[in-house]
Image: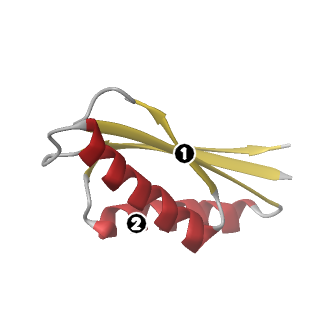
């Protein structure tokens, strides 16, 4: 079994409130969940309205396939254009 997870840190330039941030973060999370069938949630910077950390995880049986899917998640999050990605982290663990 192979477990892969990642964290994407976003900068939200046009947010002026937590309500505006919530709208953008919910949109990013729902699109990633629907397209990749991954577990996705906001994992940090909850009270800072110009920053967001979104984490995701996936389980599979092939390391290469999982690595490819994680790269596609990073690319899609960037292609959405809803927020600027300032940092990404990824780890794949063989169990």
> Residue 78 at what x, y percent from top left?
32, 62
Spatial separation of the CA atoms under disc 2 and disc 1: 17 Å
Residue 68 in sight from this viewpoint: no
Q: Residue visible at 48% across and 67% down?
A: 31
- On screen, residue 77 versus residue 37, left or right, reads left
Q: Position of residue 49 (x, y in %)?
A: 25, 34
Residue holding disc 1: 41
Left or right of 95: which side holds 83? left
Nearer to me, 64 or 24: 24
Q: Which mark is residue 23?
A: none
Q: Compared to 85, does 74 lie above or below? A: below
Tell whether label 1 touches label 2 (CB within 8 Å). no
Would you place residue 16 above or below residue 77 in this image? Answer: above
| Badge 2: residue crowd in 10 Å (few <14, some 14–19, many ≥20) | few
**Relative side of 12 to 25, left or right:** left
Relative placement, left or right, of 76 versus 19 is right
Tell me the residue that label 2 is attached to: 75
**Image quadrant where one finds the C terminus:** top right
Secondary structure type for disc 2: helix
* Classed neighbour count for the residue bearing mark 1: other residues with Cα under 10 Å, few (<14), some (14–19), many (≥20): some
- Which of the 4 quarters of the picture holds residue 51? top left
Q: Nearer the viewer, residue 79 or 33?
A: 33
Mark 2 or 1: the one toward you: 1
- Residue 23 location, x and y as percent? 33, 53
């Amino acid at each position: 079994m192979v477990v892969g997870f990642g964290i994407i840190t976003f900068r939200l330039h046009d947010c002026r409130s937590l309500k505006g941030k919530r709208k953008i973060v919910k949109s990013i999370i729902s699109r990633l969940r629907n397209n990749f069938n991954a577990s996705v949630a906001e994992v940090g910077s909850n009270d800072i309205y110009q920053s967001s950390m979104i984490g995701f995880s996936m389980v599979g049986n092939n390391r290469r396939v999982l690595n490819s899917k994680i790269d596609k998640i990073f690319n899609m999050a960037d292609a959405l254009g809803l927020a600027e990605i300032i940092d990404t982290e990824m780890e794949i663990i063989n169990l």
